[in-house]
Image (cartoon, helix red, strand yellow):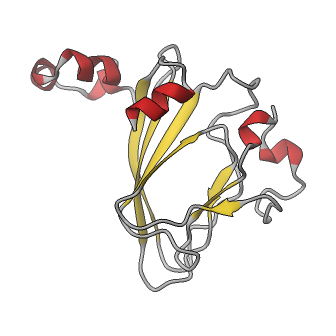
Amino acid sequence: MLAAIAHVLGGDVKLSSLNSRAALPGQGAQALHADWSGPVPEGAYLVCNSIWLLDPFTEENGATRVVPGSHRTGTVPSEAMPEPSAQHPQEVQLLAPAGTVVVFNSHTWHGGTRNNSDAPRRALHSYFCRRGQPQQLDQRGYIRPETRARLSDAARYLLDV
């Protein structure tokens, strides 16, 4: 996973945030979006995400949809589509069993679909950025000195603490 993230970001990597998402029954639909505020030139990617599937991603339970190649367009859905909540003709759903980890360039247009099942669809997101970018969660502001002291050099580097 880290090798894939490093490939997208040219080896210039730090953890930006770690969070969970649980699409509850009847919820979870998102407009297509990129995890960056605006377009970037092809190859100048700043962010990369991984989704750790705690439950299977199925058509019924609100799997994430992506538009392959959209990270190369130099635009974002809100600028390119009249209605980013609408289905995109090139979108595909990430359908996979629990335990799968999906890594994708976060400039790729993506969004959750509605969970039409009777159970939550749960996932963890580990989101990375280039080292010169601010973290979504400032790790330095939250880490305790005793915790930092127990970390390896590699972990301190990855967390940027």
Q: Nearer the viewer, residue 17 or 52?
A: 52
Q: Nearer the viewer, residue 99 or 125?
A: 99
Farthest residue to the bottom: give it: 118
Q: Residue at x 74, y 32 (%)?
A: 38
Q: Residue at x 86, y 42 (%)?
A: 79
Q: Quadrant of the N terminus?
A: top left
Residue 158 is left or right of residue 135, and the answer is: left
Q: Is residue 21 visible?
A: yes
Q: Nearer the viewer, residue 116 or 135?
A: 116
Whether residue 52 is situated above or below residue 151 in the rendered picture: below
Residue 115 is left or right of residue 16, and the answer is: right
Q: Which of the 4 quarters of the picture holds residue 152?
A: top left
Farthest residue to the right: give it: 82
Count the marks: how many? 0
Residue 150 is left or right of residue 36, and the answer is: left
Residue 145 horizontal/vertical position (percent): 14, 19
Q: Which of the 4 quarters of the picture holds residue 72?
A: top right
Q: Is residue 136 visible?
A: no
Residue 127 horizontal/vertical position (percent): 46, 38
Residue 139 horizontal/vertical position (percent): 33, 26
Q: Quadrant of the C terminus?
A: top left
Q: Residue at x 65, y 52 (%)?
A: 110
Residue 105 horizontal/vertical position (percent): 59, 38
Residue 60 is left or right of residue 76, and the answer is: left
Whether residue 158 is situated above or below residue 69 in the rendered picture: above
Q: Residue at x 53, y 35 (%)?
A: 48
Whether residue 156 is situated above or below residue 103 in the rendered picture: above
Whether residue 105 is situated above or below residue 139 in the rendered picture: below
